[in-house]
Amino acid sequence: MSQEINSFEIVKGLIHTCVKKLNLSKSVYDILSEPQRVVTVTIPVQMDDGSVRVFTGYRAQHNNALGPYKGGIRFHQDVNLDEVKALSAWMTLKCAVINVPFGGGKGGVIVNYKELSSAELERLSRAYIRAIAPVLGDEMDIPAPDVGTNGQVMSWMMDEFSRYRNYNEFGVITGKPVIVGGSLGRVEATSRGCVFAIREAAKVTGLKLQGATVAVQGFGNVGSIAARLLHEDGCRILAVSDSSGGAYNPKGLDIPALEEYKAQTGSVKGFPGSQDISNDDLLTINCDILVPAALENQITEKNAGRIKAKIVAEGANGPTTPEADRILAEKKVLVLPDVLANAGGVTVSYFEWVQNLYGYYWTGEEVNQRLERKMVEAFHNVYDLYKKRKDVDMRGAAYMLAIERITEAMRVRGWLGSQVYSEAKREIMLA
Ligand code: NAD
């Protein structure tokens, strides 16, 4: 499904619509419709058997008007340049929605990491970061984990970059283990933020979270922890899935036991007491809250009409196509868009970076409280605009909020023409 749909064309189309609705100049669209810089790298890596495999990697730096480029690194066999460009644009928008002083970037390597040994994965991680090192730095571009990468990979990358610099630069990468400058709460941050957004959405829609029913697509970092936190909040998790299959129990799944089962077997499929469920059935089961937390383009015009959830909280980036958005809006489903719903990850990445620059570390409680404040504020900023404008859905409102902030930064930086310059000059002349 994801092959046919080009996420970069989708995000450009959405930016175009919002720039028009906001009556902004064409230059704003021209700047935001392409990354400022894209780096493609060829990465030779020695395999355990002595042979050499050559991988292709990318880093897209979309926009840095609000601060250094920020965004994860994906290791997946389907990575392609347009996907990385789309993900980098979403990061620019997300950082602006959640109001952290970062721009957007994203990286990816075409690889099925499951086929590599741990030593091969380490060599690939180090080689990739070395290849893009000239465009990275704690004030330039700061990667983080995404699909197929984790804290261990971030550690190798930080270590390799520190060797390149010849001193420890912890702030060049976030999502690190706590022992090497990671932040408490970062592993859970994306899911915790998503749950904060769901709580606010439940309040405004009058849904009681206690006893609410949930389906979660994807049982990796974001999906499994979101399922656990919602389970702890008293929700009944009816179904979850991963790339191998799904598990369904109409009475609710025991999520901690399921996490253990997945750790032992590598999949949620076959969890004792559950029935198998296909991905399509999972998305369309009767439930209150649907959390897509796998990959792009999962909710499309083909299945959107059958979705029964009242709230769709996008843990994943880009899981819903524009046609599906229109169908869900007609059905009065409240969609919490990716640039809001999964912004908890980059928020705590920002906290991690701040702590690295300070060299002073916060308690987990402080991190979670600050995250909650950020998520609640962003949710209501987006929701209020959505209610006020009436001509946009929640995604449109989030994009508008973001594009206004980015445009203001570009305007005062002088990227949109000489008006600011001449005003400043006049002031200097008058003084
Ligand atoms: P992950 O690699 O830890 O997990 C991905 C999960 O999706 C795995 O369980 C995998 O089996 C499953 N999956 C893959 N293809 C599937 C399919 N076709 N059907 C069902 N499940 C499938 O990755 P993650 O970090 O949890 O990221 C998931 C999504 O969340 C991605 O869109 C990512 O960009 C987004 N995201 C992640 C973070 C973060 O902090 N990790 C932050 C923001 C957004």
Image (cartoon, rainbow, N blue to C red):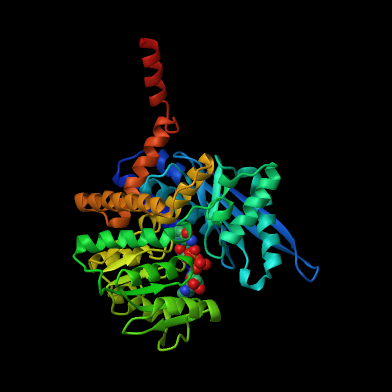
Residue 135 lies left or right of residue 91; in this view the side is: right
Residue placed most toward the observer, 103 or 305: 103
Identity of the residue drawn at 20% across and 49% down: 388
Residue nearest the viewer, comparing 120 with 348: 348
How many numbered tags mark residues here? 0
Q: Residue furthest right?
A: 50
- The quadrant in which the C terminus is found is top left
Nearer the observer, 427 or 274:
274
Give the residue displayed 32% in from the left and 64% down from the top: 325
Q: Is residue 37 above or below residue 46?
A: above
Q: Is residue 82 above or below residue 259?
A: above
Q: Return the x and y of residue 244 as percentages of the image width and height.
A: 51, 80
- Report if residue 336 is visible in the image: no
Inspect this view and state whether residue 374 appears.
yes
Q: Is residue 309 left or right of residue 363?
A: left
* Percent position of residue 45, x then y: 74, 61
Name which quarter of the figure residue 9 lies in. Answer: bottom left
Residue 304, compared with residue 392, is above or below; it is below
Between 382 and 101, the one lying in front of the other is 101
- List x then y, in percent, for residue 223: 43, 69
Residue 324: x and y in percent read: 34, 67
What residue is drawn where x is 36% and y is 55%? 340
Splitting the image into 4 quarters, where does residue 304 fall?
A: bottom left
User: Is 53 left or right of 414, judged from the image as shown?
Assistant: right
